[in-house]
Image (spheres, grey):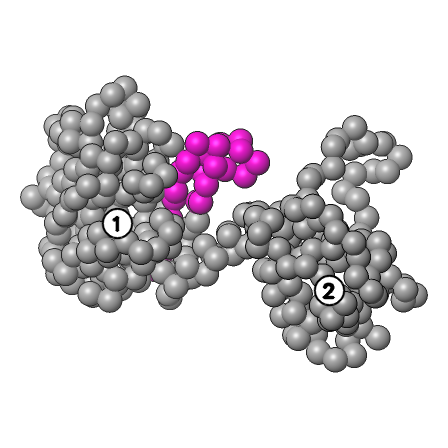
Amino acid sequence: MTYSIVARDPATGDLGVAVQSRFLAVGSVVPWARAGVGAIATQSFANVAYGPDGLGLLAGGADAETVVARLTGADALRGQRQLGVVDASGGSATYTGRSCFAWAGGRTGPDYAAQGNILAGAGVVDGLAETFEAGGLPFPELLVACLAAADAQGGDRRGRQSAALLIVRERGGYGGGNDRWIDLRVDDHEDPIGELGRLLDLTHLYLERPTAGELVALDADLAAEVRGALRGLGWDPTAVGAPVYAPMWPEEAGAGADDEERPSIGEPRAFPEGWDAAWQERLLAWMSVENLEERTAAAGWIDPRALECLRAAASKAGPGSGG
C-alpha cells in the first residue's frame, strides 16, 4: 500500500524520507529520521516501534544492515513488514517480508534504500532508485521527484491518497531549535505528490532567507512599481485610513523592549527617488502580514520572491482596489 525512499544527501549529510500511499496520513506512520544518526521507513502493517527503536540502534553505532536484522529478528510478524534504513555514513538496507502483498520488494544503493508493497510492479521501485541515482536536483526536490517517477510507473496499485517528506539536519528546524528542516505531510489529497511539491515550494518561500547576492536594488522605476502595488493593496502611508500593523505584544507591558531587532539581509543603500522611510515601513509591514519576514532586506533592497508575491497580490487585487 506504500512506496518510500530513505536517503542521505552525500553533499550535506542531510537525511530524509519521502513516501506516498493509498493510506490516510502516511506521514504519521512511515517516516522517522534524526540528524547525524539515520533515517527509517517502516511500512506494510507498519511496526511503528521500528522508528524510535531503529534510530536508537543507529545512534548506538549499529549500521543499517544490523538495524534491519535486529528489528525484524525480534518481530514475530516480520513476514508482514517492510523496512528501509539509511545510516549517517550512507550505508543502506531494505527488507520485505515474505507475506507482504504483491508486488512487493526493494532496492538499495549508496545513500538510499527504496521499497514498496501493493505496487503496480518492480518498475515502481526502479523509478525511485534510478531517479535518486540520476540526481541533478536539490535533495528535497530530488526526493519528491523520486515519488513522482514511481507514480509514473504505476505507483500504489490501489491509487493515491497521502504523501510526506521529512528531512533532518543539525539545527535545521525553525529558529534552529531542532533538526526538522523540512517536515511536510499531505494527509488526504487526490494528487498528494503534486501537493507535496507545492508545499515544499512554500516552505522555501516562507522559511528560507535569501543571500545578499540575490537581492534586487530598489531604483526609481522599481520603487514606483512597488509603491503602486502597495497603494493598490491599501498600504499607502499617505492615505487616510491606511492599515497599521500593530505589534503582537501589549505596548503598555513593554514586552519585547529588550529584544534585539531581527537583522535584515544585506547592507543598506540610499533610497531612490520616490522612496522614503514611510514607504519602507509599509513594505515591511505588508511583508509581515504575508508571513514573509524571513525575506526582509536592508533598506534600499527587496527580495525577488517577496517582489514576486507583491506583484501577484496586486494583480489579483486589480486596478483601483486600494482606493
Residue depicted at 36% across the width and 39% down the height: 12
Q: Residue furthest bottom?
A: 319
Decide: is 319 above or below 142: below
Decide: is 294 above or below 153: above
Q: Residue furthest right?
A: 240
Q: Which residue is mark 1?
A: 4
Nearest to the observer: residue 36 or residue 101: 36
Which region of the structure is painted magenta?
161-183
Residue type at mark 1 is Ser
Quarter of the C terminus within the rendering: bottom right
Q: Secondary structure at mark 1?
A: strand
Residue depicted at 51% across the width and 52% down the height: 204
Give the quarter of the image for residue 41. top left
- Tell me, yes or no, whether the highlighted magenta stretch contains residue 182: yes
> What's the mark number on residue 74?
none
Nearer to us: label 1 or label 2: 2
Residue 159, image x and y in percent? 26, 64
> What's the mark number on residue 219?
2
Residue 318, image x and y in percent? 71, 78
Residue type at mark 2 is Asp
Residue 165, image x and y in percent? 38, 48
Q: Residues within 10 Å of mark 2 (few under 14, many from 20)?
A: some
192 left or right of 286? left
